Amino acid sequence: MSLHVKKGDIVIVIAGDDKGRKGRVLHVDPVKGKVVVEGINQAYKHVKPSQKNPQGGRLHIEKAIDISNVLPVHPKTDKPTRVRYIKEGDRKVRVAVDGTKL
């Protein structure tokens, strides 16, 4: 299944509490339709002291958001853009709606 975002893309959140904010995609889960974006949908995770983390406490983490709530940033205009795929030879290439390669 081809998705409109992949790991490492810069995306803009188009819905939810973080609407309008930009971030880099850290992880994509195509089965669940979720994406983890750096600096978006942050929460605290309370952890008990362990050998790895002897002090314990609260860790700041990014939680997953629905993939339909993000759009990739157009490289030239720096605005959100929709994505389509074209065939170049035997490969599928991801391009913006105006034809610019992403």
Image: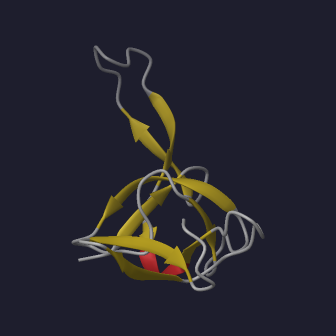
Left or right of residue 98, residue 51 in this image: left
In the foreground, 100 or 24:
100
Location of residue 81 by image quarter: bottom right
Reply above or below: 101 against 39: below
Reply above or below: 67 against 57: below
In percent of width and height, residue 51 lies at 28, 14
In percent of width and height, residue 53 lies at 37, 19
Reply above or below: 45 against 68: above
Left or right of residue 81, residue 64 in this image: left
In the foreground, 22 or 64:
22
Left or right of residue 4, residue 14 in this image: right
Location of residue 16 by image quarter: bottom right
In percent of width and height, residue 13 lies at 62, 72
Reply above or below: 35 against 43: below
Q: Which quarter of the figure is the C terminus placed in?
A: bottom right
Kindly identify the residue that appears in the image at 74 percent across and 65 percent down: 76
- Farthest residue in the front direction? 89
Kindly identify the residue that appears in the image at 23 percent across and 77 percent down: 1
In the foreground, 13 or 61:
13
Q: How many marks?
A: 0
In percent of width and height, residue 52 lies at 31, 17
Left or right of residue 89, residue 37 in this image: right
Kindly identify the residue that appears in the image at 68 percent across and 61 percent down: 22
In the foreground, 12 or 40:
12
